[in-house]
Structure formats: structure tokens, C-alpha cells
Amino acid sequence: MRGVATTVVSDGTLLDLALDAFADGGYDGTSVRELCRRLGVSHNLVHERYGSKDKLWYAAIDHGFRRLAADLATAAIAIEGDELDRLRAILVRYVEVTAERPALIRIVNQEAARPGGRLDHVYEQYIRPAHEVADAVLRDLERSGRARRLSPAALHFLVGHGAGGIVSLPALASHFPGDHGSLTAQAREAVEIVLRGIVTDPP
């Protein structure tokens, strides 16, 4: 097959494109042959590097979510403020990254409709650790009288599928009338509304 040499295509490029493909078609609807055709490389490339479509899926997920985790950690460290400022920075950065790389939340949506090993991997490796960090911050705020109790599940769905939905479903968002600013601005507004529902006045 004519195309670029396999050594020219970086793992990052291949995994980014794989994320988009899995987000668009789901696991079952994604063709490795079509993915290689879009890259202009031999169909053997994926098998040479990853062994199978299943291993490619896990490699792409790890590639995308590790970048997300690094972005969130950087946002938390960069903030000079209290726990509420840190929580706000983490949530806002989450929806910003979702706007920049919507394939992540779209893949979660693909897998979350039914139980399975792929969903378990995403939850155990990435969703649960992130929630444990956020939950620890919320507990500190609760102990100081600045926040009410909120379950990790409620926080996840309010932010991930509430605020995150604004940026992960652009076709639907475009139907709402009026000038609402950039998608990132809308996401920040949604995060602020969520926080207003959590935070209480200090005693």
C-alpha cells in the first residue's frame, strides 16, 4: 500500500486519531482498516504496535486520560488560594479540556450505557481516582462549614454530563438561541452554577 512509512506516524498521532474514531463509532463500529487508511499507512501498523483493536482501545484511552489527569493536576497546583479555589480550577479545567478534546467524554458516554471491562477500566483507573481527590476537597470544605455534603456520583453527573454536555454536544448547543459566548465561557458559567449549589455561607 502506498502511503507514509510506519515509522513516520507517531504513537501520539495514531492514538489521537483512534480516540476520535472510537468516539464517533464506538468500539464495535470502529474499523482499524479505515483508521489506517485515514493515516495512509499499512493495515499491519496497528497489529505491529498494539496487537489488536482491543489493545489499541486501551492504549488510546490511557493516552487521552493520562493527559487529562496531568492537566487537572497542573491546574490544581497552579492555584494560589483555598480549597474552593482549587476545586473551581479543577472543574473549570476539566470542562476546558473536554471542549478541546471532546472524544474523551464521548467515549465514556459510549461505554457507560452497559457494563463491561472497558467501562470498568475507565472508572477504576481514571474516574474513581479523580473523584477521590474532589471528594477530599469537598470534605474539607464541609468540615469548615463552607459546603454541604455531596456524593461523588452527584458531582460527576452535574459536572461531567451537565457542564461537560455543553461542550461535548456542540450540534445541540448551537440550536439554543442567543449569543452565549464561547463554549468554554458557557462551560465556566455552568461550573459556577454547580458550585453555587454546593457552597454555603461560612459560619
Image: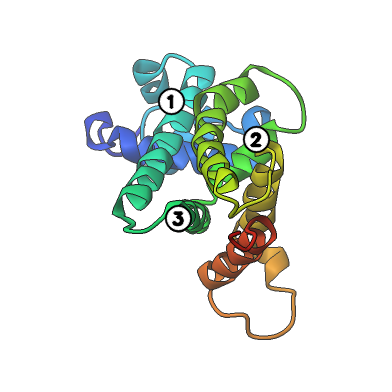
Neighbour tally class for label 1: few under 14, some 14-19, many 20 plus, Cα within 10 Å:
some
For marks 2 and 1, the one nearer the N-term is 2
Residue to which mark 2 is pinned: 26
The residue at 49%/23% (across/down) is 58
Q: Closer to the camera: disc 2 or disc 1?
A: 1
- Which of these two is toward me, 92 or 175? 92
- SS of the residue under disc 3: helix
- Which of these two is toward me, 21 or 164? 164
- Which of these two is toward me, 96 or 16? 96
The residue at 23%/36% (across/down) is 8
In this rendering, is residue 156 above or below 203? above
- SS of the residue under disc 2: helix
Q: Position of residue 181 (x, y in %)?
A: 56, 80
Q: Position of residue 163 (x, y in %)?
A: 64, 58
Residue to which mark 3 is pinned: 93
Residue to which mark 1 is pinned: 59
| C-alpha gap between disc 3 and disc 1 | 23 Å
Q: What residue type is labelled 3?
A: Arg
Evaluate whether residue 169 shows in this view: no
Evaluate whether residue 188 shows in this view: yes
- Residue 100 falls left or right of residue 42: right
| C-alpha gap between disc 2 and disc 1 | 15 Å
- Residue 156 falls left or right of residue 57: right
- Residue 118 falls left or right of residue 69: right
